[in-house]
Amino acid sequence: MVVSMSSKLKNILDEKGPIRKIGVIGMGYVGIPAAVLFADSDAFEFVWGFQRDSPTSGYKIDMLNRGESPLKGDEPGLEELIKKVVDAGKFRCTSDFTRISEVDAVTLAIQTPFLSAKSLEPDFGALIEGLRLTGRNITEGTLVVLESTITPGTTGGLARQILEEESGMKASEDFALAHAPERVMVGRLLRNIREHDRIVGGIDRESTQRAVELYSLVLTSGRIIPMTATAAEVTKTAENTFRDLQIAAINQLALYCEVMGINVYDVRTGIDSLKGEGITRAVLYPGAGVGGHCLTKDTYHLERGVKISGGKLDYPQGMESIFVLARKVNDFMPVHMYNLTVEALSRAGKTPADSKVALLGWAFIRNSDDARNTPSELYRKLLLDSGCAVEVHDPYVKEYPGVSISHELSDVVKNADAAAILTGHDEYFKLDASALKELMGKEHPVIVDGRNVIKPDDFIAEGFVYKGIGRGDKN
């Protein structure tokens, strides 16, 4: 249940009036589009974007203040909107966190990875630092909103504790605190923030209402769904967990179809054709693995939330969580890609130790530069461990620690024994079988399609050894 609103906080907020100035902590895939959308609203006077001036991300400050986007994937309208609000004098990025004292509301969009999937212990180091900086600088009546995906119970627990310790004030009495999880996908950041329904959960009624006030002004077609902070935390972790489960289901079906010698896409079309009142199938697509910052960890946030809640879970004794099992299936798909590659190389009379593989796609999602938790990394490691030479191509990813990435496709595939497609970039849909074979210079080159981007028959006709996920009819 929502805690009764604090009359003290209500009086403070009534006297303070509407939200006019906003701070957004964390200039990444969530913080940047959120900040510029706030800045573009006539309801708000000014938005500060807060970014640490670190060796790895400090460059974003000057880029943003020049009106340029640090995100180099395909993000429709983002760079134009950044320039618009910078030129209008409504947005500026800074590393001076004392300016939090100038804002009426501050949101935190900071990554929350897990240290280890086995321990289920999140790495809240960056979030804790952001909370401490926020607590030290907020003033009476400030609304603090966590947009980061977090373990259920964090907003009213750890976050509240840190903010109160640092500020010397009390949440629900002196300042408002809420969770409004981001729901964006790279490639459509602005559209998602404007159009997706927004989950908003405060630690009390007044905090919820204040957060609703903040977010309702940037929505175009989405609606606000108010709830408690913990319910909002569970909503976010559960929606990603369910998506991961759906992907695992089609991935497992794809493995079944390979064994039975049929095409998983035919089966998928058949399943998806059954429509009608009360019928919901929501069949997704199989692939070479799941990456990104959310789906790879949010299951574990949800599982941890249950464990730390202190409640007793009534569940089949000794049975593993279906959500955790789904995670393991999706984590296995890069391994399956490796197995398909080894099988195909064997058919071509090669072993990994005497082969070169052109790895096509390092980003975890098509037409983006986002390579966080990319499944390509495990695939590459397995190849290297087997003695294989590996070269990587991606048209969007500029660099990645410890990995050399080329932007010239012809250089990467030249003289390669195999080409493996790990990401569904538009560029790979245009691969021509004859031209690729000539570049590879092999009588029977291998192609392994992890995203169903090529037409198998075209490549088989050119002498390729083909392997594809879920393509038992062609493998």
Image (spheres, helix red, strand yellow):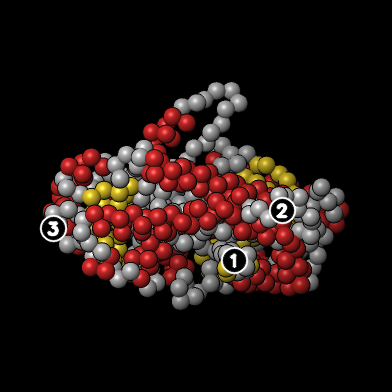
Q: Residue furthest top?
A: 277
Residue 320 position within the rendered picture, expressed as x and y whole percent measured from the top left: 63, 54
Label 1, label 2: how far apart the Cα atoms are: 20 Å
Residue in the picture at 41% in, 57% down: 334
Residue underneath mark 1: 118
Label 2, label 3: how far apart the Cα atoms are: 56 Å
Left or right: 341 as drawn, with respect to 316: left
Observer-side mark, 1 or 2, equals: 2
**In terms of secondary structure, where does tag 3 sit?**
loop
In the rendered image, is residue 10 in sight? Answer: yes
> How packed is label 3: few (under 14 Cα within 10 Å), some, or many (20 or more)?
some
Disc ID at residue 399: none
Left or right: 362 as drawn, with respect to 306: left
Q: Earlier in the sequence, mark 1 or mark 2?
A: 1
Residue 100 position within the rendered picture, expressed as x and y whole percent measured from the top left: 64, 66
Residue in the picture at 75% in, 53% down: 313
Q: Exactly how many numbered labels are in the figure?
A: 3
Q: Mark 2–mark 3 contact, CB under 8 Å?
A: no
Residue underneath mark 2: 317
Query: Which residue is at the front of the view, 137 or 411?
Result: 411
Q: Is residue 458 above or below residue 360?
A: above
> How packed is label 2: few (under 14 Cα within 10 Å), some, or many (20 or more)?
few
